[in-house]
Image: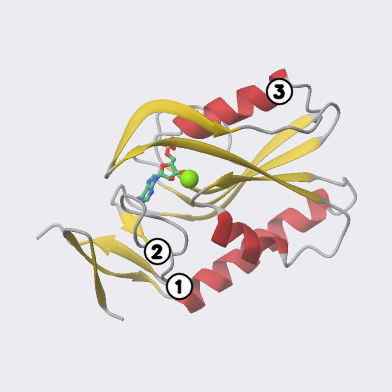
């Protein structure tokens, strides 16, 4: 579809599902040499990252574990700069090679918080994998180890990403039409 309506806003096609899958494969190929012999613990940051994570992880034919946390910082189309931990991790991460999987890094607040929490809990290493990155919105200075694609500072939906909890199910990614 060229355009979709999500709640009160119109969105136009931005990344097709074919381009998305190509990008996911490229991210996996960056990660495999680093992680295949590390028995990593992949921590999926809910809600948005579940679709990307499901596609990414199916490229990994080696020993690994999967866990979920749920963090929230966005309201409508704006970051609140405050991270709420809605669901934390229950297992021990001491000495583990943790890889946080995120859909998109915008101001960077959410992943700064998560990285710090996992270091405090005793993880040996905490890496970040994000499908999308908005460099012009980034307000932090940590390294993002694996990035699918850099995009302008525009609001997008689809492929797990939502606008007020709507629009996550679309297989393509759409950008808000500001006209
Ligand atoms: P940050 O803490 O500002 O880096 O924001 C990261 C979180 O905000 C992501 O996990 C997303 O849930 C959400 N987010 C950031 N940009 C967008 C967007 O364009 N569309 C939908 N959600 C977004
Ligand atoms: Mg998210």
Q: Are marks 2 and 3 in contact (CB under 8 Å)?
A: no
The figure's colour scheme reads: secondary structure
Image quadrant holding the C terminus, namely bottom left
Residue pointed to by mark 1: 171
Residue 10 in the figure: left or right of residue 175: left
Image quadrant holding the N terminus, namely bottom left
Q: Where residue 158 is drawn, which disc sits there? A: 2
The mark nearer the N terminus, 2 or 3, is 3
Disc 2 Cβ-to-ligand 1 distance below 8 Å:
no
Vertical arrangement, residue 78 with respect to residue 39, above or below: above
Whole-angstrom CA distance, mark 1 to mark 3, is 34 Å
Q: Are marks 2 and 1 in contact (CB under 8 Å)?
A: yes
In this rendering, the count of numbered labels is 3
Residue pointed to by mark 3: 119
Whole-angstrom CA distance, mark 2 to mark 1, is 6 Å
Label 2 sits on a secondary structure element that is: loop
* Spot occupied by residue 91 in the image (x, y as percentages of width and height): 78, 33
Ligand 1 lies in which image quarter?
top left
Packing grade of label 2 (10 A; few <14, some 14-19, many >=20) is many
The quadrant in which residue 158 appears is bottom left
The quadrant in which residue 67 appears is top right
Whole-angstrom CA distance, mark 2 to mark 3, is 31 Å
Q: Are marks 1 and 3 in contact (CB under 8 Å)?
A: no
Residue 31 in the figure: left or right of residue 22: right
């Amino acid at each position: 579809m060229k355009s979709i309506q999500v709640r009160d806003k119109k969105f136009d096609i931005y990344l097709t599902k074919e381009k998305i899958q190509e990008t996911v494969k490229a991210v996996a190929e960056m990660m495999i040499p680093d992680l295949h012999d590390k028995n990593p613990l992949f921590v999926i940051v809910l809600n948005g990252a579940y679709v990307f994570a499901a596609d990414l992880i199916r490229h990994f034919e080696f020993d690994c574990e999967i866990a979920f946390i749920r963090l929230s910082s966005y309201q409508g189309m704006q970051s609140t700069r405050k991270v709420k931990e809605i669901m934390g991790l229950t297992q021990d991460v001491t000495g583990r090679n943790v890889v946080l999987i995120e859909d998109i890094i915008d101001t960077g607040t959410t992943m700064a918080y998560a990285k710090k929490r996992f270091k405090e809990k005793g993880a040996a290493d905490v890496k970040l994998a994000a499908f999308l990155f908005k460099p012009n919105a980034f307000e932090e200075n940590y390294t993002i180890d694996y990035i699918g694609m850099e995009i302008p500072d525009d609001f997008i939906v689809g492929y797990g990403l939502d606008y007020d909890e709507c629009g996550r199910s679309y297989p393509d990614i759409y950008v808000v039409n500001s006209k």
